[in-house]
Image (spheres, rainbow, N blue to C red):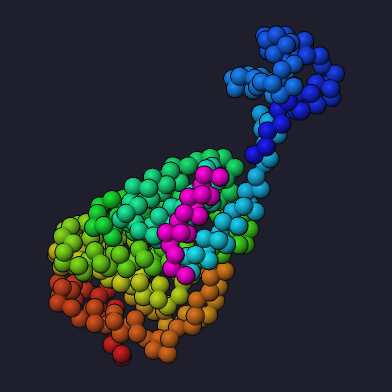
Amino acid sequence: MNLYLSDKLKEMRSKKNISQEKLAQYLNVSFQAVSKWENGNSYPDITLLPDIARFFGITVDELLCVEKLDENKLFKEYSIKAGELFRVGKRDEALAVWQEAYRQMPNNIDVKEMLMSSYFDTDKDKYFHEFIGFATDIYNDDAEGQAGNMYYKGQAISQLARCYAERGDMETAQKWALKSVPIFDSSEVISALIDKGDDLLSDVAFCTYWFLEELFYMTCRIDNDDSINLGNAYKQRCFEVVSKIFETVYQNDDMGFEQLQHLYNLHQGIAGREADGGKNEDIVRRHLERAMECCEKSVSVKNHTLTHPMLYGWAVSDAPSDNMMNLKMMKKTLAEKIYDDVRSCEWFQKLEIKTAAL
């Protein structure tokens, strides 16, 4: 940053044909004070800078001749440097690069996001409080003019949910995961991302895909890990929330074989827990029929690019050679004893018929 206040004052006075006396009168100071500023013998009180800038119709930065940072260029330079260090395992040094970037650009949301992620990737236990601070700051940032601001919120939610889950605080993890539903279904985020361009959309697709994968496996861990004793009602709620997130993002079941398999597992899990408790038959039916629908659709999955803007450009592969895998799992599900109370129901028998030949 270079300061040439004395030269700038003389330049602006000359350009606008204003005397030292007139400027002094406006600022309620002596013309001798103005003369000293222009000669470089002293500087005006910092509280006068906004008034001086306003008098000449310029910003304080322009008055001080502050060289405006090309933040995009600088961000790329820091990204390259940190990326090279990260790739060779020097995570602490990469973190230091982003800390320096933050000192240079404290209001740049891209820098904040990278520093948040760097704290998480370097040592999320050691830097827990720093990580939480940046993540919540990004989530709460509603600054106008930040294209893709909702995208950054989604990134913060993803890492906050994962961080709390890995620390065993499943209740807080679930609270953050729940916040992702409106993020993924927001017209604001879609329009902002489209305006931002293809590069960011591709990054969003990558992050969205892996966030959903992590969310699914985190839910499975909650269900299967005996050390996590949160009760069936809590587990049921987790399955319901994650299935809703999947169906929000993968609209109209536009997803790959594995995602349909995940969704099958979520719905059959909800149905099984409901049946095991001898509760609502309508809920059991609805989720078993939805699980069957996912299995049937997975058989014919073809290589294609997904359509939701949050998954822009993300391609899925053809169904595997054993494309009946999910239906075979469904057959085993229907044979479980927990469904004996509904086995004689017509709707259940229709489901069994669909898997009878397997």
Residue numbers of the magenta segment: 88-105
* Quadrant position of residue 345: bottom left
Please determine whether, in this image, residue 287 is positioned above or below residue 326.
Answer: above
Q: Residue at x 60, y 57 (%)?
A: 77
**Where is residue 219 shown, x and y percent of the image?**
29, 64
Q: Main secondary structure of the magenta part?
A: helix
* Quadrant position of residue 344: bottom left
Please determine whether, in this image, residue 146 is positioned above or below residue 316.
Answer: above
Q: Quadrant of the C terminus?
A: bottom left
Please determine whether, in this image, residue 202 is positioned above or below residue 134.
Answer: below
**Where is residue 305 shown, x and y percent of the image?**
55, 73
Q: Residue at x 40, y 64 (%)?
A: 212
Q: Residue at x 43, y 86 (%)?
A: 320
* Quadrant position of residue 239: bottom left
Q: Is residue 309 visible?
A: no
**Residue 95 forms part of the magenta stretch:** yes
Left or right position of 296 against 37:
left
Left or right position of 265 against 62:
left
**Where is residue 192 shown, x and y percent of the image?**
58, 51
**Where is residue 214 shown, x and y percent of the image?**
36, 66
Q: Residue at x 45, y 83 (%)?
A: 319
Q: Is residue 106 visible?
A: yes
Q: Nearer the viewer, residue 17 or 249?
A: 17
Please determine whether, in this image, residue 126 is positioned above or below residue 312.
Answer: above
